[in-house]
Image (cartoon, coloured by chain):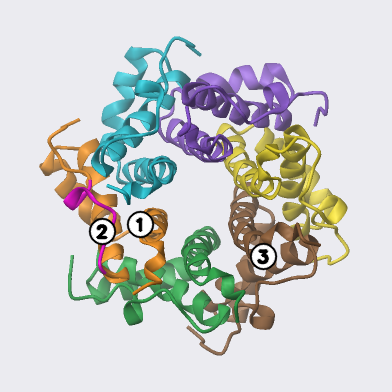
Chain colours: A cyan, B orange, C green, D brown, E yellow, F purple
Amino acid sequence: MSDQIQLIPGNSLITATPEEGRMLAVKMSRLVIKITQPDTEIREKLRPVYASDAAMLIAIGQTVAIEFATIAAANNYWKDK
Amino acid sequence: MSDQIQLIPGNSLITATPEEGRMLAVKMSRLVIKITQPDTEIREKLRPVYASDAAMLIAIGQTVAIEFATIAAANNYWKDK
Amino acid sequence: MSDQIQLIPGNSLITATPEEGRMLAVKMSRLVIKITQPDTEIREKLRPVYASDAAMLIAIGQTVAIEFATIAAANNYWKDK
Amino acid sequence: MSDQIQLIPGNSLITATPEEGRMLAVKMSRLVIKITQPDTEIREKLRPVYASDAAMLIAIGQTVAIEFATIAAANNYWKDK
Amino acid sequence: MSDQIQLIPGNSLITATPEEGRMLAVKMSRLVIKITQPDTEIREKLRPVYASDAAMLIAIGQTVAIEFATIAAANNYWKDK
Amino acid sequence: MSDQIQLIPGNSLITATPEEGRMLAVKMSRLVIKITQPDTEIREKLRPVYASDAAMLIAIGQTVAIEFATIAAANNYWKDK
């Protein structure tokens, strides 16, 4: 585990728009994988594996959905905008 | 990762009806897969794989259910309509 | 994707009773599978597969549980009834 | 699908105690499997399969946890008791 | 199913500290497995299986996380303490 | 099960920043695995297994996402900071 990896870009869940919040969810889900497997070479080998596997792509989608739920609630669903 | 892909159509979670919210959940879950595997050709090959696999169809259903939970809450469950 | 499929029967999450809300959760989870695999023949072939597979039945149960959580919250858990 | 199966015993999420709410979660998760596979004989054959499989037992636990989250919220976590 | 198994120790979700709440989540997740597979001998055989399997350990972690979410909400996240 | 293992470092869900909350989510998810498999030697053998397996890395990501949802809610999403 490399504690130097920043897990939340900008250290905030607040974003200007839903689109930015969604992108933050994608990034946060990737950074957890980075901290669990800090070796860039191994991660680079795994990327084509999951990116070509339907079941894994679906599982990535589930993870992003869970992260996004938190971000959306933090932003009060961007209702006030 | 192609940052040009729009992850949330309309950049808003607010929809007029539950039906439109549900369709948004379906689209958002697909766009995450698109940003993770931006190669259209590979995605086209994977489509018949998951669309003919019972376990994957169920997993897609779980993802849509999670996305929809967020959208439904954002719309205050469309109670006022 | 067939956009003509209605994803939420009645276009509302509000139901008279918990039992009706639960049935709506079951229906909504099935309609997502229908929109992902609109070919009736293929779906008919997949039905006995998942209905006889313990792991898939459990996964279907998880999906219904997630859908129901949203419906129950939308109905304020039918507390006012 | 047999529409005669009651999906929520008592047609209510409200229970006197957390223990009763937990039992309701267990029952609700089983009744979804019953409505998806209404054939008693097939279900009886599947029972020893999942009851002896560590991964499936864990997955059942996840389902019950999700159902219980809804029931607990419906009962305001039994805080008023 | 053995109805004599107590599913929630103390029949309450309220705990003095987050640590105790976390331990309750662990216990509750195990008791669901116990009620699903009441045969102690079979459960004892399954224990080394999941305790030595990385994927199952991760799945157990997911279950505990879901149980803990409910317990934490019930305790208002121990903010008042 | 070793009851001496502390499951929540600091016995609190409250953190100064989202980044610290995210790190707490990572730690909490690992400590559940530790209490389920207290044998350090076995855990050390499992680490390279899941850290080199794309599907397991994704599953770890899902677990962290669920833990983080609870921590973020406990901190009122760090909105006031």
Q: Magenta residues?
A: B8-16
* Dot 2 and dot 3 residues touching (CB under 8 Å): no
The residue carrying pointer 2 sits among few (fewer than 14), some (14 to 19) or many (20 or more) residues within 10 Å by Cα, namely many
- Classify C18 as above or below A74: below
* Mark 2 and mark 3: Cα distance apart in space: 30 Å
Q: What percent of the width, then of the height, locates residue F43?
A: 64, 21
Name the front one of labels 2 and 3: 2
Please state which amino acid type lies under the numbered disc 2: Leu
Residue wearing tag 2 = B24
Please state which amino acid type lies under the numbered disc 1: Ile
* Dot 1 and dot 2 residues touching (CB under 8 Å): yes
Decide whether residue F69 is among the magenta residues: no
- Residues behind callouts 2 and 3 on a single chain: no
* Mark 3 and mark 1: Cα distance apart in space: 25 Å
Mark 3, chain letter? D
Residue at 55% x, 22% y: name it: F16
Residue at 58% x, 70% y: name it: C77
The residue carrying pointer 1 sits among few (fewer than 14), some (14 to 19) or many (20 or more) residues within 10 Å by Cα, namely many
Name the front one of labels 1 and 2: 1
The quadrant of the picture occupied by the N terminus of chain C is: bottom left
The quadrant of the picture occupied by the C terminus of chain C is: bottom right
Q: Using the image, tell me which numbered label, if any, was put on residue D25.
A: 3
Closer to the camera in the image, B64 or C46 = B64
Decide whether residue B13 is among the magenta residues: yes
Q: In this view, does C47 lie to the left or right of A18?
A: right
Residue wearing tag 1 = B71
* Mark 1 and mark 2: Cα distance apart in space: 8 Å
- Residues behind callouts 3 and 1 on a single chain: no
Q: What percent of the width, then of the height, locates residue C32?
A: 33, 66
- Classify C48 as above or below B46: below
